[in-house]
């Protein structure tokens, strides 16, 4: 009985499959559209949920580091439902626009911020899924210029920040926006040069190639030693990590929104759901920055031995979680730099170091 | 069809990325409560009434930074195609990797001279 | 891959490489020590010149045929380097003790490198890049005396017009690439074009783009203001060197690469040449500022040189083409000496006024009255330069005009030659006026002695001008030999 049902379902699926293949071959634009649509829905959903999770994690984590309790009322001892409560609160708050604001810039800022994060996510692969003996790459696109694309999309977010600051026309906001641009200018170059170093060593800008390269050092006869770029380019790892922290606006580099002097910097006049969108986009950037970091320097979804394809996703997200925790540790233990110190670090230390790393990478790259 | 396979989904993402925040903002405008109290719309300045405009001109130091940034960013962009073809097996020019290495070395040395110059001239000082 | 292999293949690049190295050394050393920079630049120029002359008759292509090294390119490099050396010698005094000497000599050398690469370019892309390198450095040079509003104006105008002309030139180049699918001059010269709207547009854009640089008449507006406002040493460099960059680019693009197109266009070139020389001479008549007068005279001279383009597009007889191009090359060489020398002589007077703290317009014609008594060497040299520009026998100007005008007559364009001769006669008026002021008027200011560096530079230019006029034989031979590239 059950066997018959399974068989029938199987035939139906087969029929559907052949039909779909037929349709797709007839209308070649349907498949990418479908992938895009499903992917957009799934990734947006995952990002929002993961963002909420990371917010909760950060609150708990920072509370632990400061020997506080953190959220512990709503939804049990660990405050699991705190964010749901916050969300309801935010949705029912009044939608305020300051009278001096440029309405288009003010409204456009959260749009750009979210757009940047989503477009960034669209360029990254997350691992493989094996269904019925076939492996599928969990990625919206697998571009040959993937790394460049993701970097470009990440850089767009600074427009959102500047629009927010300039558009809300409050003094704190404008100063925060200027600082943000200055910071971006200082750290974009070391970031880009480190990415180039990674690409030189691998010989490709495709994420899948980069990840496969990092599986193990088997070409040196070391079968179970990971060939992570963390090990091959420790300097690049350092420069990239610091620049990424700066680009994400994480704590030692959060001058644009320094609470103590600029109240909340470029976001000071945002409230309610508009504020939530910008706030979420920051956390998206944290998560996606961690993903980028894992893909480029921590071997992506691979471990230096064979493993089933379905394990790649958990491995990947495990690594991402570790990176996020590391970022949180840094964030809640370091004091904030002054803006001129930030510039000095970026221009006078990281930039030469990144060039040294590039020389190292191209020299090693010749040999590998 | 690699072009369509790779870039059409991005178009969908683009539309999505616009629609999600726009939808949220429209939704909020529909359900959020409204109270009439004009003082709420004054930009936040720790409780004081704002004095003067906020759209100030900022320090000219930005200018030199921006120029140096522009040069180095263009350099980095120029490095990308070089990086990809560095070990490309499809390129059959003999000694290509070595030649590419030397050429890029020259390029970066020239840039470094500019960098040293900018540094010594104080273009990289935030406060002058 | 060893040193000898590199030298045998890339050895022809040495002059440019040496100059670049010196430029970088100068800008780094200039951060600390300033007194030796000018001499360093001079040494670099001399070494580079020596290397070019050693390799004069090479025939090599480099970097996938995008650079060519042949007598034509070497000839122009010699011209550029000579002008740069003259400029450097004069600058030794003018920029003595200036806080920004490092930048000045750096830009000067880099501009020269750019011009040298233009002479070597064999590809639209390398031509454009070199053109920009040569231009951008000179924009800054023109505005180098940043305390002087005139200089700022000069630099700004030059930059705006130059940027515009670069854009126009690039558009024309992109059209050519669109039509033919290649950017290489060798490949382009073997193409056969059909005359269509696109080729028409491409040619118009290219003529306009290069016309700006050569200061041909509808595109000349920047030249007087820039030459007048820029520091005089830089004006010498611009008029005598940088302008030739436009000519070599035009020769390469129009005569060498677009050989198939040029025959249709002789009338356009003829009209441009005639308008250019006539306009330049007519406006020069009324100038009181000597630098401005020289600028307009420079426009007129560009008109004479452009006659070569007319002749070459009109006739196909090899000997006439050779004569016209050889004449143009000789003209360019002698113009470098005459015009460079004239600007430097004017600069000498300007410098003496500045040194003796006499506050007047530095280049007003009144300043030159009685110069033969206060500054005899400068006055005499300036006289020779001006007569050479007018085309008086026994000077370089006479021989070059003779060559070009006879090419026009042999080519069947006698009317063009007649117009040019009338123009020369006209030009004699305003040149002679300056000579009269210098020798017959009473001295207006009491100037104390001529600065050595300037005098050396002026005398060197004088030597060149006279040598080319009195003993032109070998130089004409060289120019004719070089011009065989165009056949």
Image (tube, grey):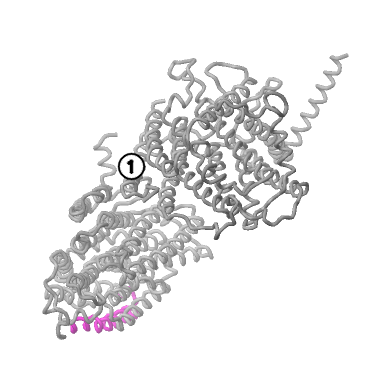
Residue at the image point whose x is 36% and y is 77% from the top:
C274
The overriding secondary structure of the stretch rendered in magenta is helix
The percent position of residue A256, horizontal first and vertical second, equals 52, 44
Left or right: C157, with C242 as reference point: right
Q: Quadrant of residue C275?
A: bottom left
User: In x, y percent, where is residue A272?
Assistant: 68, 44
Chain holding disc 1:
B
Q: Quadrant of the C terminus of chain C?
A: bottom left
The secondary structure type at the circle numbered 1 is helix
Magenta-span inclusion, residue A95: no
Front residue of C402/B127: it is B127
Reply above or below: C465 against A27. Answer: below
Classify residue B73 as left or right of residue A69. Answer: left
Would residue C259 be visible to someone looking at this image? yes
Q: Is residue C197 above or below residue C303?
A: above
* Residue designated by label 1: B109
Residue shown at 48% from the left, 32% from the top? A334
The answer to whether residue C18 of the structure is visible from this angle is no
Q: Residue furthest right?
A: A1
Nearest the eye: A244 or A215: A244
Asked if residue C414 lies in the magenta stretch, the reply is yes
Task: Give the extent of the magenta segment.
Answer: C408-437
Crowd band around label 1 with a 10 angstrom C-alpha radius: few (<14), some (14–19), many (20+)? few
The percent coordinates of residue C404 (x first, y second) are: 28, 72
Apparent side of residue C269 relative to residue C107 in the rendered image (left or right): right
Left or right: A99, with C471 as reference point: right
């Amino acid at each position: 009985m059950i066997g018959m049902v399974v068989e029938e379902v199987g035939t139906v699926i087969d029929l559907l499959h052949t039909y779909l293949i037929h349709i797709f071959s007839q209308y070649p634009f349907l498949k990418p559209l479908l992938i895009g649509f499903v992917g957009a829905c799934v990734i947006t959903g995952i990002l929002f949920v993961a963002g909420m999770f990371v917010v909760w994690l950060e609150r708990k984590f920072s509370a632990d580091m400061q020997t506080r309790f953190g959220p512990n009322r709503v939804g049990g001892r660990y405050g699991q439902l705190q964010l749901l409560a916050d969300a309801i609160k935010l949705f029912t708050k009044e939608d305020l626009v300051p009278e001096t604001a440029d309405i288009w810039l003010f409204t456009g800022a959260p749009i750009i911020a979210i757009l940047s994060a989503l477009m960034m996510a669209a360029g990254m692969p997350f691992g493989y899924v094996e269904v019925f003996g076939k492996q599928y790459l969990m990625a919206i696109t697998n571009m040959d210029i993937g790394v460049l694309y993701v970097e470009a999309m990440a850089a767009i977010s600074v427009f959102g920040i500047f629009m927010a600051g300039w558009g809300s026309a409050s003094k704190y906001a404008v100063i925060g926006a200027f600082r943000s641009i200055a910071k971006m200018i200082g750290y974009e170059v070391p970031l880009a040069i480190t990415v180039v170093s990674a690409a030189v060593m691998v010989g490709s800008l495709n994420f899948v190639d980069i990840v496969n390269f990092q599986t193990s050092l088997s070409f040196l006869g070391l079968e179970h030693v990971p060939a992570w770029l963390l090990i091959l380019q420790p300097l690049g790892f350092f420069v990239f990590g610091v620049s990424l922290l700066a680009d994400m606006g994480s704590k030692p580099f959060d001058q644009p929104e320094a609470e103590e002097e600029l109240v909340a910097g470029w976001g000071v006049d945002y409230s309610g759901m508009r504020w939530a969108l910008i706030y979420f986009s920051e956390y998206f950037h944290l998560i996606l920055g961690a993903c980028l970091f894992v893909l480029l320097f921590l071997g992506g979804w691979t471990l230096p031995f064979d493993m089933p394809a379905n394990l790649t996703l958990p491995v990947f997200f495990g690594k991402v979680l570790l990176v996020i925790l590391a970022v949180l540790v840094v964030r809640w233990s370091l004091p904030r730099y002054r803006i001129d110190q930030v510039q000095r670090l970026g221009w006078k230390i990281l930039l030469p170091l990144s060039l040294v790393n590039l020389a190292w990478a191209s020299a090693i790259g010749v040999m590998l | 069809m690699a072009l369509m396979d790779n870039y059409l989904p991005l178009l969908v993402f683009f539309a999505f990325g616009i629609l999600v925040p726009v939808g949220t903002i429209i939704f909020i405008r529909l359900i959020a409560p409204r109270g009439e109290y004009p003082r709420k719309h004054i930009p936040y300045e720790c409780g004081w009434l704002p004095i003067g405009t906020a759209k100030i001109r900022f320090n000219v130091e930005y200018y030199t930074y921006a120029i140096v940034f522009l040069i180095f960013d263009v350099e980095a962009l120029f490095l990308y195609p070089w990086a990809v073809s560095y070990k490309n097996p499809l390129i059959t020019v003999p000694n290509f990797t070595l030649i590419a290495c030397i050429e890029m070395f020259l390029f970066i040395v020239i840039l470094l001279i500019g960098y040293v110059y900018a540094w010594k001239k104080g273009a990289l000082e935030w406060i002058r | 891959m060893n040193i000898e292999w590199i030298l045998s293949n890339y050895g022809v690049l040495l002059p440019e490489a040496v100059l670049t190295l010196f430029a970088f050394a100068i800008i780094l050393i200039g951060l600390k020590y300033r007194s030796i920079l000018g001499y360093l630049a001079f040494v670099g120029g001399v070494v580079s010149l020596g290397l070019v002359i050693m390799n004069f008759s090479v025939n090599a292509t480099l970097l996938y045929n995008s650079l060519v090294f042949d007598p034509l390119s070497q000839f122009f490099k010699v011209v550029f380097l000579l002008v740069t050396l003259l400029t450097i010698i004069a600058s030794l005094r003018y920029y003595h003790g200036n806080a920004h000497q490092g930048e000045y000599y750096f830009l000067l050398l880099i501009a020269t490198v750019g011009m040298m690469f233009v002479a070597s370019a064999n590809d639209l892309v390398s031509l454009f890049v070199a053109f920009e390198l040569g231009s951008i450095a000179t924009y800054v040079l023109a505005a180098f005396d940043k305390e002087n509003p005139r200089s700022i104006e000069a630099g700004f105008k030059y930059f705006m017009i130059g940027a515009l002309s670069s854009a126009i030139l690039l558009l024309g180049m992109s059209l050519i690439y669109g039509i033919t699918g290649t950017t290489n001059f060798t490949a382009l010269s073997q193409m056969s074009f059909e005359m269509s709207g696109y080729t028409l547009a491409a040619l118009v854009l290219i003529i306009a783009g290069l016309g700006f640089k050569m200061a041909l008449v509808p595109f000349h507006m920047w030249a007087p203001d820039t030459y007048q406002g820029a520091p005089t040493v830089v004006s010498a460099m611009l008029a005598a060197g940088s302008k030739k960059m436009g000519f070599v680019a035009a020769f390469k693009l129009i005569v060498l690469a677009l050989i198939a197109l040029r025959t249709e266009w002789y009338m356009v070139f003829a009209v441009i040449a005639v308008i250019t020389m006539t306009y330049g001479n007519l406006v020069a008549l009324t100038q009181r500022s000597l630098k401005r007068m020289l600028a307009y005279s420079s426009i007129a001279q560009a008109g004479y040189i452009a006659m070569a383009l007319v002749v070459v597009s009109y006739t196909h007889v090899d000997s006439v083409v050779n004569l016209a191009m050889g004449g143009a090359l000789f003209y360019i060489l002698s113009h470098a000496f005459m015009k460079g020398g004239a600007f430097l002589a004017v600069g000498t007077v300007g410098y003496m006024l500045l040194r003796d703290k006499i506050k007047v317009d530095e280049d007003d014609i009144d300043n030159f009255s009685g110069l033969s008594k206060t500054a005899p060497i400068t006055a005499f040299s300036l006289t020779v330069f001006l007569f050479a520009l007018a085309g008086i026998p026994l000077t370089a100007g006479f021989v070059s005009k003779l060559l070009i005008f006879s090419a026009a007559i042999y080519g069947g364009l006698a009317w063009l030659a007649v117009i040019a001769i009338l123009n020369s006669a006209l030009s004699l008026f305003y040149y002679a006026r300056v000579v009269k002021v210098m020798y017959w008027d009473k001295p207006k200011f009491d100037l104390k002695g001529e600065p050595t560096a300037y005098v050396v530079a002026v005398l060197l230019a004088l030597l060149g001008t006279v040598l080319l006029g009195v003993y032109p034989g070998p130089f004409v031979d060289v120019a004719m030999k070089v011009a065989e590239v165009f056949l």
